[in-house]
Image: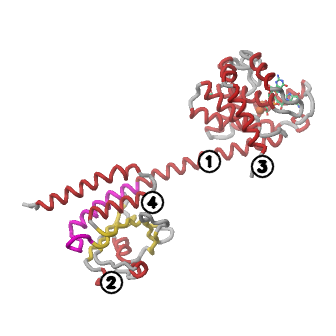
Amino acid sequence: MVTISESEVLENKRVLDLLFSYMPKIAAERKMENLLVLMADMGRSIVMADRCSLWLIDEDRGELWTKVAHGVNELRIPIAAGFVGWSVKNGLPVLVDDAYLDPRFDRRSDGKTHYRTTSVMAVPLFDSQGKVMGVFQAINKQGEQKVFSRQDLERLTLTAVYSAKTVESARLTSEVEESKEELEATQEELIHVLGDISESRSHETGDHIQRVAEISYKLARYYGVSEEEAVRIRLATPMHDLGKVAIPDAILNKPGRLTEGEFEVMKSHALKGEELLLKSKRDLLRFAAVVAGSHHERWDGCGYPRGLEGDEIPLAGRICAVADVLDALASPRCYKAAWPEEKIREEFIKQRGTQFQPELVDALVEHWDDIFACLRQVRAEANTPRF
Ligand code: C2E
Ligand code: SIN
Ligand code: SIN
Ligand code: FE
Ligand code: FE
């Protein structure tokens, strides 16, 4: 029968308390560097060491790296150095009373820092495949004994098992998040490139595309669309006129009214844009195709290219139609001067329920000053040089 002394019971309780106090902090931390510091702190308290560090293997560089509290940079050592190197190489723990009596000790580590290493423990960390991924190291036992016990080694081993799982799951999470962020960044970049291409072809002044995107976002929010969907609309609307890249220059930039025949050609930009964007498999670009193909439909069914009516028209297209005309009227074009603000407002009220969905005109009129200010602000920003 195994008997446990009273001091051991107390000691186990102390270790458990420590574990429970660190676990929530560790679970809430997502940055790997901060995790290493937290777990090293926890290990140091559990085994009552003067110093403790959690080293991870960097395979590409053949090194071990760690981060210490208050340290600016990460620390790096060769993968085969000292006790930690031995532990990594052999997948075995180290328990040493006096480092200077052991040939595995790398004295350079003390030499550089004027620190005197005596007792040492090192325990390898294994990933879920059983491969060594790092090592937990504790230096200089505090208290009366001055050396680490077998129980300390067991406790550090347990801490290492827990730490290995934490590091592994933190790595998985950050990989997923990074690839998600990267994908979104790529999409946004593509959208702006496509938007710039269509804008540069049609010689429109200022950043029509950017203004239509911002106004569409605001209208969507005022209309009651969720934040997430409004952001999607803001990302998709910059491509509404992408199809203009297929319109001959003589028509696109004609400094006067278009003939009927020319306007028929001009109208093809809606379907052309839709067709170009549908070549993509990306959700966002396919959503932009819907906007391009529906931004000239009218609520009364007299628009183009399909003559859709009312809520047959995709909401994002209805919203983009309002934003597009608002900006077209407020801006000078090769064929017309900018309209005064009050005349624009009257035009929208006149077109309520004919060209535009009544509720969208209501939202626009109710928040007129804010939306019009947004139009001016984007224009001011667009007139300052960009790089
Ligand atoms: P845009 O200049 O960006 O105009 C977008 C939309 O704003 C127009 O779609 C129209 O609904 C509205 N809009 C623009 N200016 C006026 C206006 O003076 N009065 C009224 N009531 N609405 C206006 P729309 O008509 O389908 O035109 C599509 C695009 O075709 C225009 O984009 C522009 O690039 C071109 N376009 C239309 N008419 C002419 C024209 O007479 N001359 C030239 N050169 N281009 C034109
Ligand atoms: C929307 O999601 O706002 C409308 C788009 C669509 O109906 O395709
Ligand atoms: C634009 O406002 O640049 C063009 C709008 C359109 O094609 O209607
Ligand atoms: Fe258009
Ligand atoms: Fe437009």
Q: Earlier in the sequence, mark 2 or mark 1?
A: 2
- SS for dot 1: helix
Q: Amino acid at mark 4?
A: Glu
Residue denoted by label 4: 33
Residue denoted by label 2: 103
Q: Earlier in the sequence, mark 3 or mark 1?
A: 1
Q: Earlier in the sequence, mark 3 or mark 2?
A: 2
Q: Amino acid at mark 2?
A: Pro
Q: Residue 358: percent from the left, percent from the top?
A: 68, 17
Query: Is residue 15 rendered to the left or right of residue 34?
Result: left
Is residue 313 in the magenta section? no
Residue denoted by label 1: 185
- Mark 2 C-beta to ligand 2 under 8 Å: no
Q: Earlier in the sequence, mark 4 or mark 3?
A: 4
Q: Amino acid at mark 3?
A: Pro
- Mark 1 C-beta to ligand 2 under 8 Å: no
Residue denoted by label 3: 385
The quarter of the picture showing ligand 5: top right
Count of labels shown? Answer: 4
Q: CA distance from mark 4 to mark 2?
A: 31 Å
Label 4 environment density (alpha carbons within 10 Å; few <14, some 14–19, many ≥20): some
